[in-house]
Image (cartoon, grey):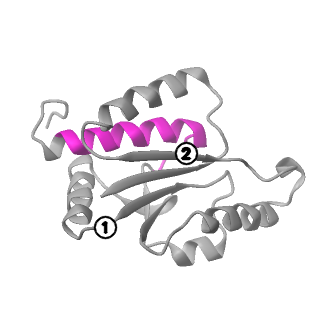
Amino acid sequence: MKITLLFIGKTDEKYLKDGMDIFRKRLAHYIPLEVLEIPVPKKWNSLQPSLLKQKEGEIILAHMEKSDFPVLLDERGRSFSSVEFSGFLQNQMNRSVKNLLFVFGGPWGFSEEVYKKAALKISLSSMTFSHQMIRLFFLEQLYRAFTILRNESYHNE
């Protein structure tokens, strides 16, 4: 299995990029990981939220393959504990999922077309975080999940 993270927009802050790089390097020991940063639509800040979601949705859908298992990071999604999330990853590997695609949308969420294509929606917290910070948090949780699966000492319970 491969994991792909699809981000709308670039990661701007250096401290977030540095943290993301740390976990990307750590994850390389466990699984192939690809990170795609897709540019935001042109003149995005002058678009109505519904039109922006539609344009972002078209971009997201263009990057989805039939063999992907698309998972949206969404505030209304299912919550997992770290152990439960590691179990979810193990289940996807057992099912021989080719590419587990985690999609991080823009500030207004996803278009209806993207929601319809999603196999699952997950939420990292009921709190709201910036779209940039959640990238780092999610990479850390991916790393934590693989250390749990390998019975390594990173996660304490």
Among numbered discs 2 and 1, the one appearing first in the sequence: 1
User: Would you say 58 lies left or right of 122 here?
Assistant: right
Q: CA distance from mark 2 to mark 1?
A: 30 Å
Q: What secondary structure do most residues of the magenta stretch adopt? A: helix
Mark 2 lies on residue:
128
Residue 150 is situated, as x and y percent measured from the top left of the image, at 12, 42
Where does the C terminus fall, quadrant-wise? top left
For the residue pair 147 and 94, the one nearer the viewer reads as 94
Q: For the magenta stretch, what is the residue range? A: 126-147
Q: Which mark is residue 97?
A: 1
Q: Say few, some or many: other residues with alpha carbon within 10 Å of mark 2 (under 14 / 14 to 19 / 20 or more).
A: few
* Residue at x-position 78% and y-position 60%: 52
Quadrant in which residue 22 is drawn? top left
Asked if the residue under mark 1 is in contact with the one under mark 2, i.e. CB atoms within 8 Å, the reply is no
Q: Say few, some or many: other residues with alpha carbon within 10 Å of mark 1 (under 14 / 14 to 19 / 20 or more).
A: some
User: Would you say 63 lies left or right of 156 here?
Assistant: right
* Residue at x-position 55% and y-position 41%: 129
Residue type highlighted by circle 2 = Thr
Residue type highlighted by circle 1 = Val
For the residue pair 106 and 23, the one nearer the viewer reads as 23
Where does the N terminus fall, quadrant-wise? bottom left
Is 127 within the magenta? yes
Instruction: Decide: is 126 above or below 114.
Output: above
Is 142 within the magenta? yes
Residue 116 is situated, as x and y percent measured from the top left of the image, at 55, 78
* Residue at x-position 31% and y-position 31%: 26
* Residue at x-position 58% and y-position 38%: 132
Q: Residue furthest left?
A: 151
